[in-house]
């Protein structure tokens, strides 16, 4: 659900591309609906609802699209009917609510301090991963440099984030990231001290994180 709405310039928005996909509408028809609204009342400040931008398709061609806030979305989908349309309207409402709550939370001192702590903690974890990368290479690994991305994905997935979403994590997610990355740092450090096989160190990190998720009710273990 988090991919339905994103944050642009401190505003929760969705795109015509996503709307056309979810509501099974041709993108050019969705664009036309918005253009027709804008043309119908040129005196209205439509920029507060819709912002025209562009994207590149698979062929590399640049095409027009719109980002829209909650009000713009409501105006666009007002006439969409049917059971599935209702389903996606509700999904988008929930997604907008979540993102707008996050925007409010990000203004708090607690979120800002937690985000700073998370960044500092991430640097410490990166230092430990750097040691593991060197150790793995010494022991024959050809893909050791991928550990930076691999461990980041491992931590992000555990708290329900994609790689590009850390700046949009809630305070709770940030706190869990700090704990998980501390687990990774500890396991790596302990494994290097005991000269554990590098693949076993990674596997141990996965197991410890799954244990943490179970204890913290972050989701079912695999």
Image (spheres, rainbow, N blue to C red):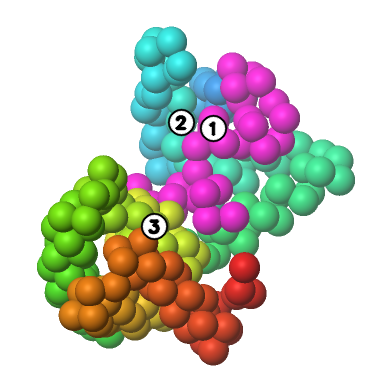
Whole-percent x, y for residue 78 in the image: 70, 42
**Most foreground residue, 139 or 10:** 139
Which one is in front, 84 or 143?
A: 143
Q: Name the residue under label 3.
A: 153
Horizontal and vertical percent for residue 153? 39, 57
Q: Position of residue 165 (x, y in %)?
A: 37, 57
Q: Is residue 165 visible?
A: no
What stretch of residues is rendered in magenta?
1-30
Q: Which of marks 1 and 3 is nearer the N terminus?
A: 1
Q: Circle 2 is placed at which residue position?
A: 66
On residue 16, the disc is 1
Q: Distance between the residues labelled 1 and 2?
A: 5 Å
Q: SS at mark 1? A: helix
- Cα gap from disc 2 to disc 3, whole angstroms: 30 Å
Q: Nearer the viewer, mark 1 or mark 3?
A: 3
Mark 1 or mark 2: name the one nearer the start of the chain: 1
Distance from disc 1 to disc 3, alpha carbons, whole Å, reads 28 Å
Residue 19 locus on image (x, y percent): 61, 36
């Amino acid at each position: 659900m988090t991919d339905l709405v994103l944050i642009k310039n401190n505003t929760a928005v969705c795109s015509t591309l996503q709307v056309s996909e979810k509501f099974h509408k041709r993108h050019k028809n969705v664009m036309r609906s918005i253009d027709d609204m804008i043309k119908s009342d040129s005196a209205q400040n439509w920029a507060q609802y819709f912002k025209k931008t562009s994207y590149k398709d698979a062929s590399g061609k640049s095409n027009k699209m719109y980002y829209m806030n909650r009000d713009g979305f409501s105006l666009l989908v007002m006439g969409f009917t049917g059971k599935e349309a209702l389903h996606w309207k509700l999904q988008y409402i929930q997604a907008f609510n979540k993102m707008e709550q996050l925007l409010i939370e990000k203004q708090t001192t607690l979120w800002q301090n937690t985000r700073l702590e998370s960044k500092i903690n991430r640097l410490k974890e990166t230092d430990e991963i750097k040691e593991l990368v060197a150790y793995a290479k010494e022991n024959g690994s050809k893909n050791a440099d991928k550990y930076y991305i691999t461990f980041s994905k491992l931590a992000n997935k555990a708290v329900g984030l994609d790689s590009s979403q850390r700046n949009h994590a809630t305070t709770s997610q940030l706190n869990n990231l700090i704990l998980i990355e501390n687990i990774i740092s500890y396991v790596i450090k302990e494994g290097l001290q005991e000269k554990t096989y590098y693949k076993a160190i990674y596997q141990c990190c996965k197991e410890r994180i799954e244990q943490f998720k179970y204890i913290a009710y972050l989701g079912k273990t695999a």
